[in-house]
Amino acid sequence: MNFRHIALGLCFLAAASTSYASENAMDGQSPSFLDRYATNVQELVVRALSFVGVNYRRGGESPETGFDCSGLVRHVFRESLGLVLPRTSRDISRVGETIHREALQPGDLVFFNTLRHGFSHVGIYLGEHRFVHAPASGGEVRVEDMRLNYWSKRFNGARRIAATEIPIAPN
């Protein structure tokens, strides 16, 4: 696993998103969700990576008690973007915009069939074919390469979250 490449990608993403948000803020309008999303994707990815090593726990939604796959995704999106996602990976897969594998960007959600039914597992795409997820009982949050045979055969699709469909968490 090459975290140096991920860090370089994050630097590029931060520069691009800061430029995008700055250009749109210059027109005197308050930042749109898209501006906030572009600015906060770096935070979202860094926050997701900060949980690497946290134990898996079925139904878990916090770093203190552990995460399952959807609990990790929900926690990261709520803390980074203030968005409340549905509880299960299957329900999360119905939110946002469908993204083709070739168009994946950091912060997109990737879905897999790991339990013999579609969209049974979710992770957060990091870039360079890698994603962070909470794998299964006995495991811990980790980074995986989507090109590995196991993940490649089970890939169900990807989504980019759209704010218009998701409630914003109260501050």
Image (cartoon, rainbow, N blue to C red):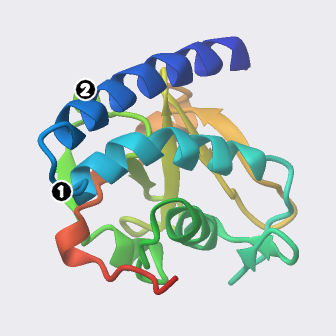
The quadrant where residue 150 appears: top right
Q: Is residue 65 above or below residue 138?
A: below
Rendering coords of residue 49 (x, y %): 69, 43
Q: CA distance from mark 2 to mark 1?
A: 14 Å
Residue to which mark 2 is pinned: 102
Which kind of residue does numbered mark 1 sit on?
A: Glu
Q: In this orientation, which residue lies closer to the viewer: 140 or 37?
A: 37
- Which circle's residue, 2 or 1, is located before the other in the chain? 1
* Picture residue at 71% right of the left edge, 20% below the top: 3
Rendering coords of residue 15 (x, y %): 42, 20
Total numbered labels: 2
Circle 1 sits in a helix, a strand or a loop, which is it? Answer: strand
The disc placed on residue 97 is 1
Circle 2 sits in a helix, a strand or a loop, which is it? Answer: helix
Position of 67 with respect to 20 (left or right) is right
Q: Is residue 104 above or below residue 154?
A: above
* Picture residue at 39% right of the left edge, 65% below the top: 119
Q: Is the C-beta separation of discs 2 and 1 under 8 Å?
A: no
